[in-house]
Image: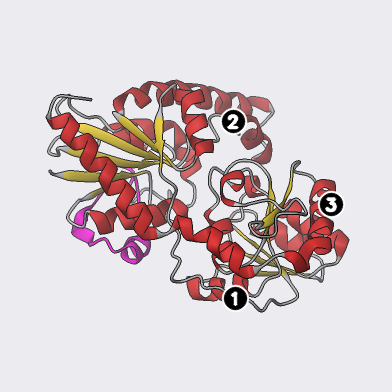
Amino acid sequence: MKIALVHDWVVKLGGAENCLALFHRLYPEAPLYTLFFDKKSLDRLGFAPEQVHGSMLQGWRKIEKRYRRYLPILPYAIEQMDLSGYDLIFSSSHCVAKGVLSRSDQLHICYCHAPARYAWDLAHAYLREHRIDKGWKSLLARVVLHYLRIWDTQSANRVDYFIASSQYTAQRIWRVYRRESRVIYPPVDLQNYVLEEKKGDYFIYVSRLVPYKKADLVIRSFNESGLPLIVVGDGSTYDECCRLAGSNVKLLGWKNKQELAKLMGQARALVFAADEDFGIVMVEAQACGTPVIALGRGGAAETVVPANGDNWDEATGVFFHEQNIEALNSAVKQFLAWEDYFTPRVIWQNAQRFGEERFCSEIKDFINMKYRAFQNGRI
């Protein structure tokens, strides 16, 4: 079985790239096809240079930082990649990777991290946050997103089987593509994040600093309460977050896994305000025995067990249900009232169901099962 891996792009490493690293571990001989890449990031994922095939976009000026400007041609670029020499195409997609062209005698399985959110449920928020909700630039952007949605829906028919990163993602795949999917939760490096029973005096926020992650909401909330907050991450809104931060808020930028594990392990709680498809950082915090204060929808509803005042043998966090300062402040106050009832070992135990070995086993079993069925003429 000759397998090709396909991933949208490899620049900054996040949850999708953690999955890609394990796909590479499962199939170390499989080449990687991607629109564009950063060589240092590929090295960290373990790919040899000769294994990686960039698209026509590789090397374009500043594309790694300004890829959104090239959004109109991403579907065209992914379709120009020739994967005709493989038996199985395994795509890891959060944008256009699933749209590669294949033959009728090839099997295509897609691990879908999410349908492109800026084209679907976050389209209007995306336009507002990038200040292109009015004027001729807005018209152009809306036309581009309109045609991207058409292409995205049509290209879903090129996939034989979808794997979803969560039940929430599976619902979105059905709503957007009208396709069923198998849920296999993303992996967490449980060996790197270890139980820490002794906590410090600060709260922590960990994320890429981009608009939909709502770092500004968390910072404003903690500015009001005056509680100590550490912000870990970088991204397009880093400078804005620095301007917003009060004296009780410290921005530390990007941290490696070891540094992050120590910071999360000693935090009183992780604060998470995004509507995320899975939210791997919430599981990483729980793997340190650290409770989570999270928006109670999306992936959080599948990874965090909310406290109700009477379930301390399983509770791992507190939910709020609106993305505003009042709701988050209320959740933080509730956490403070319940803080002493949370048990780090109970929280740690909840995270154990999301390990890397479980992920690799489920992925490999699914691929083998579907490929055998495909060979026997069943699909």
The answer to whether residue 55 is seen in the rendering is: no
Quarter that holds the C terminus: top left
Discs 2/1, front: 1
The image quadrant that residue 78 belongs to is top left
Give the mark toward the camera: 1 or 3: 1
Could you tell me residue 69's position as x and y percent? 49, 39
In this rendering, position of residue 288 left or right of residue 154: right
CA separation, marks 2 and 1? 37 Å
First of labels 2, 1 by sequence position: 2
In the rendered structure, find residue 121 and report the number of the disc placed on it.
Answer: 2
Rounded to the nearest angstrom, the CA distance separating label 3 from label 2 is 27 Å
Where is mark 1, residue-wise?
A: 196
SS type, badge 3: helix
Question: What residue is shown at x 60% (from left), y 34% (from top)?
Answer: 122
- Magenta residues, as a range? 35-57
Please state, as top left, top right, bottom left or bottom right, where the N terminus lies in the image: top left
Task: Specify the amino acid type for callout 1.
Answer: Glu
Name the disc covering residue 330, or none: 3
Query: In the picture shown, does residue 31 fall above or below 194?
Result: above
Q: Residue at x 51, y 24 (%)?
A: 175
Crowd class of label 1 (few under 14; some 14 to 19; many from 20; radius 10 Å): many
Q: In the rendered structure, which disc, 1 or 3, sits on the residue that comes first in sequence?
A: 1
The Cα atoms of the two marked residues, 1 and 3, are separated by: 26 Å
Under circle 2, the secondary element is loop
